[in-house]
Image (cartoon, helix red, strand yellow):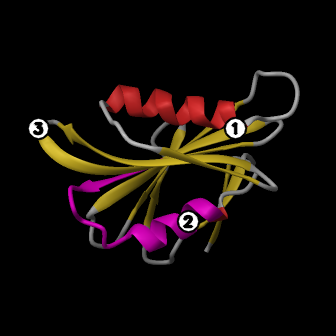
């Protein structure tokens, strides 16, 4: 299902996933409740064209807040993107994270998916959802 959020972005969400809008983000939950994908839209304040450094800064900011370490991969094409996967503890529970930022001329998106450590059952679906995010 194509989901449009407040005129900011569109995202393809599987029909069996639940959509919540708690405040200034979208939360997508798989039917088995094994994780949650959070998508936040940010207004871009920097002048000029988006850069990989901006995308990397967003991912680093998120990782630092969660105590995560790991490599950041970037892609450049029709959009600027950075992504990382890392493990950390959330409320004492070990968690696996996927975090992706996308930067466009007028806005950016920070998407993060968390699930129990070593639970990779939704990775392909999550990657497809994140890839579908468009301004």
Is 125 covered by the magenta stretch?
Answer: yes
Instruction: Give the CA distance from mark 1 to mark 2.
Output: 21 Å
Instruction: Give the CA distance from mark 1 to mark 3.
Output: 33 Å
x%, y% of residue 98?
42, 52
x%, y% of residue 54?
67, 31
Q: Residue at x 55, y 65 (%)?
A: 129
x%, y% of residue 5?
65, 52
Crowd tier of the residue under label 2, counting other residues whose Cα lies within 10 Å: few below 14, some 14–19, many 20 or above = some
Residue closest to the eye, 2 or 63: 63
Instruction: Give the CA distance from mark 3 to mark 2.
Output: 28 Å
- Disc nearer the start of the sequence (1/3): 1
Is 66 covered by the magenta stretch?
Answer: no
**To which residue does mark 3 refer?**
92
Q: Residue at x 16, y 36 (%)?
A: 91
Which of the numbered marks, if any, corresponds to residue 52? 1
Evaluate if marks 1 and 2 touch, with contact meaning CB atoms under 8 Å apart: no
Q: Nearer the viewer, mark 1 or mark 3?
A: 1
Evaluate if marks 3 and 2 touch, with contact meaning CB atoms under 8 Å apart: no
The boundaries of the magenta stretch are: 112-131
| Number of marks in the rendered image | 3
| 113 on left or right of 8 | left
Q: Nearer the viewer, mark 1 or mark 2?
A: 1
**To which residue does mark 2 refer?**
129
Q: Residue at x 70, y 38 (%)?
A: 52
Crowd tier of the residue under label 3, counting other residues whose Cα lies within 10 Å: few below 14, some 14–19, many 20 or above = few
């Amino acid at each position: 299902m194509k989901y449009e959020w407040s005129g900011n972005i569109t995202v393809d969400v599987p029909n069996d996933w639940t959509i919540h809008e708690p405040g200034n983000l979208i939360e997508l939950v798989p039917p088995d409740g094994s994780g949650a994908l959070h998508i936040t839209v940010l207004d871009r304040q920097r002048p000029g064209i988006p850069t990989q450094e901006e995308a990397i800064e967003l991912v680093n900011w998120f990782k630092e807040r969660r105590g995560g370490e790991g490599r950041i991969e970037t892609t450049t094409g029709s959009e600027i993107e950075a992504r990382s996967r890392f493990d950390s503890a959330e409320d004492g529970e070990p968690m696996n994270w996927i975090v992706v930022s996308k930067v466009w001329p007028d806005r950016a998106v920070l998407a993060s998916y968390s699930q129990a450590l070593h639970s990779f059952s939704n990775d392909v679906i999550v990657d497809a959802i994140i890839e579908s995010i468009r301004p």
